[in-house]
Image (spheres, grey):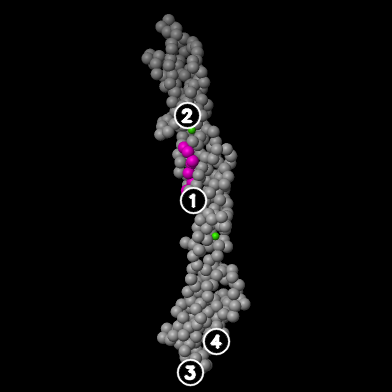
Amino acid sequence: ISRSEVDAGPLLWRQKRTWIPPPKMLIENVDYRNEPFIARIFSDEQANLPVRYSLKGKGATENPENLFVVDPDTGLIRLTDILDREKIPEYNLLGVAKYLDGSNAETNLPLRFKVQDENDCTPVFGQMSPGAVKELKTYIMTINATDDDEPGNPNSQIKYTIVDQKPAGESMFYISPQGELFVRRAALDRETQDAYMLTIEGTDLNGAINGNTGTGTVVVNILDVNDNLPVLEKDSYEGSIEENTANMEVMRFKAIDADLEYTDNWLAQYEIISGNEAGYFSIETDPKTNEGVLMLNKAVDYEELQELDLKVAVANKAPFYLSGGGG
Ligand SMILES: [Ca+2]
Ligand SMILES: [Ca+2]
Ligand SMILES: [Ca+2]
Ligand SMILES: [Ca+2]
């Protein structure tokens, strides 16, 4: 356990020797109001002529006024209230010694009181905007809670853990002690679950059992990648056309794609790969339904052509996602 020192400045007026006694540790939340003194200022000049002591600065003559008070005759300094480091972490006062005629007996003495931190603040999570990660990827975001205790002190050093995942089941995420949120394995599948809600716990004292704990929730959205190929509903289709007609729709075939609807990962692109050497047909995609629409562009002469076997291939508008590992 580290105890930060209370620095009451030099114990002497600059030129003189006797400042007694050594200053006490001032710890926030500790009640020193009944202590006879917490520090003392003293001038050797007192041996020659009467000296009156006073204090100047924030905590004495300025807000918070008269928190530190000094006995004008003895130089004993007392505290009139309980200290809160999170409000004021240190006090820089001046000790003043004057003769009865008002002239300075000494140069004013800087008195510095640092307030020792106590772990009386709990980690606090603000509103966290949703994180997002592409399925099959791993790093998501860094979580950050705040603790009002002293910076650089274990009292404000937070260790992070995940305490809940919705939907439950296999835990898909992990968090480093420093708050970096990762996918546990590259196994997230948007097609199975497109968002998770995580409850993150932050414990100060670097996660010690007696630390203070706060929690926050964060949503992780799983972004789509094109990891599903479009497939046609049926293996083969049959249609008929009347001879001597042109510019008409012959038939539609639907592609099924598990990726995010109405995105390039979902949209199908159809291509006739054989059977259209004479150029009678073309295919367009109906972007609302993802259907392939087979169009007859020019009239077919029945005597010339009774049956035609077209082979059609389908792919997505977006390139297929090639991942390192399976999935
Ligand atoms: Ca704390
Ligand atoms: Ca504190
Ligand atoms: Ca797809
Ligand atoms: Ca996908």
For disc 1, the marked residue is: 177
Residue 156: tell me if it is visible.
no
Q: Are marks 2 and 3 in contact (CB under 8 Å)?
A: no
Compute the Cα span from label 1 to label 4. 52 Å
Which badge, 2 or 4, comes first in the chain's sequence?
Answer: 4
Front residue (pair 296, 131): 131
Name which residue lies at 43% across and 15% down: 310
Q: Residues within 10 Å of mark 4 (few under 14, many from 20)?
A: some
For badge 1, the amino acid type reads: Pro
* Magenta stretch: includes residue 183: yes
The residue shown at (48%, 83%) is 19
Q: Position of residue 47 (x, y in %)?
A: 49, 93
Residue located beneath label 2 in the image: 228
Residue at the extreme top of the image, as rendered: 303
Residue tagged by mark 4? 74
Cβ–Cβ below 8 Å for labels 2 and 1? no
Residue drawn at x 55%, y 49% is 200
**Category of crowding for the residue at label 3, using alpha-carbon neighbours closer than 10 angstroms: few (below 14), some (14–19), many (at least 20):** few
